[in-house]
Image: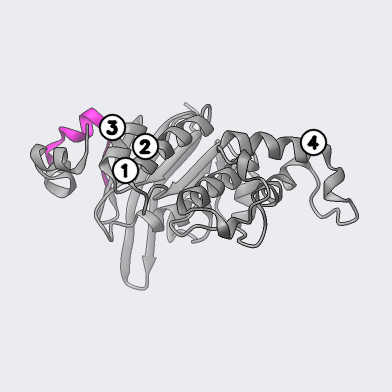
């Protein structure tokens, strides 16, 4: 079977410290997978290995069947993988429209054609309008990103992340810092904008995890101890002991 994303015995050491300890994970096209685990489990390191920010000590990452060893982050992005970060990563002094247009120019083939006037790029501008509507920011078209609310900035980052047409999306704690109502709306937005795409998300809010993911991968001390449906993971005794806690504690955390 061909997978959208496959990790094979992936390992990462920093000096003598082994952070990622032989991770194997196979994600089918179109699946939504949440990666959960305690602080220090290696979740962000795993994302950095997948997206090319870190080189693995050993093991392999495959994107749509193609090995990523030696690829730089921008090369991996152009192969169809895009990610967001824990800290909002946008252009604060550009408008919503300009942020999104920057995110899609390369995918439309414009690359470094500096002699073109951006206002004349009808296809880019039309696609940017579509993205703004998709992330519900079409009423903030000319607002500078720095003046958006936190939740709106996160939505804009999601828009930039998907702008290039990537079919594998990595979201690192997308709802961190949001209120309960903002989180509910944001889950709905993520579901809408990732239809037909493969999604990996690192998330601490168990309500988000159980409301969004088709499967959950539980990472503990650099190892995946479970990878299954939310229901199966929730009832896994090893997972309960290592991370989720008792069923009563899960209910208090918002799992459903």
Which SS class for mark 4? helix
Q: In the rendered view, how is the structure colored?
A: one colour
Judging depth in this view, the residue of 11 and 97 nearest the camera is 97
Q: Residues within 10 Å of mark 4 (few under 14, many from 20)?
A: few
Q: Is residue 71 visible?
A: no
Judging depth in this view, the residue of 213 and 160 nearest the camera is 160
Give x and y (percent) for residue 25: 38, 40
Magenta residues, as a range? 224-237
The answer to whether mark 2 and mark 1 are in CB contact below 8 A is: yes
What residue is disc 4 on?
A: 123
Marks 4, 3: nearer the viewer = 4
Q: Residue at x 83, y 49 (%)?
A: 118
Q: How many marks?
A: 4
Which SS class for mark 1? helix
4 lies above or below 152: above
Residue 180 - label: 1
Q: Is residue 155 visible?
A: yes
């Amino acid at each position: 079977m061909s997978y959208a994303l496959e990790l094979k015995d992936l390992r990462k050491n920093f000096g003598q410290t082994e952070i990622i300890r032989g991770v194997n994970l196979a994600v089918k096209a179109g699946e939504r997978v949440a990666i959960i685990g305690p602080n220090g489990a290696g979740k962000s390191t795993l994302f950095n290995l997948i997206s090319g920010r870190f080189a693995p000590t050993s093991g392999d990452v495959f994107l749509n069947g193609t090995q990523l060893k030696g690829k730089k982050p921008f090369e991996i992005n152009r192969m169809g993988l895009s990610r967001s970060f824990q800290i909002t990563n946008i252009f604060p002094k550009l408008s919503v429209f300009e942020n999104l247009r920057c995110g899609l120019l390369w995918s439309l083939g414009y690359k470094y054609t500096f002699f073109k006037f951006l206002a004349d790029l009808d296809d880019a501008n039309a696609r940017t309008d579509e993205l703004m509507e998709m992330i519900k920011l079409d009423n903030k078209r000319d607002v500078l990103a720095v003046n958006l609310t936190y939740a709106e900035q996160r939505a804009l980052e999601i828009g930039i992340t998907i702008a290039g047409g990537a079919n594998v999306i990595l979201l690192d704690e997308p709802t961190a810092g949001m209120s309960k109502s903002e989180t509910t709306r944001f889950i709905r937005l993520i579901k809408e904008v990732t239809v037909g795409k493969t999604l990996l998300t690192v998330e601490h809010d168990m309500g988000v995890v159980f409301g969004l993911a088709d499967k959950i991968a539980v990472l503990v001390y650099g190892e995946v101890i479970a990878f299954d449906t939310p229901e199966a993971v929730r009832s896994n005794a090893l997972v309960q002991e290592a991370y989720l806690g008792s069923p009563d504690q899960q209910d208090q955390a918002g799992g459903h």
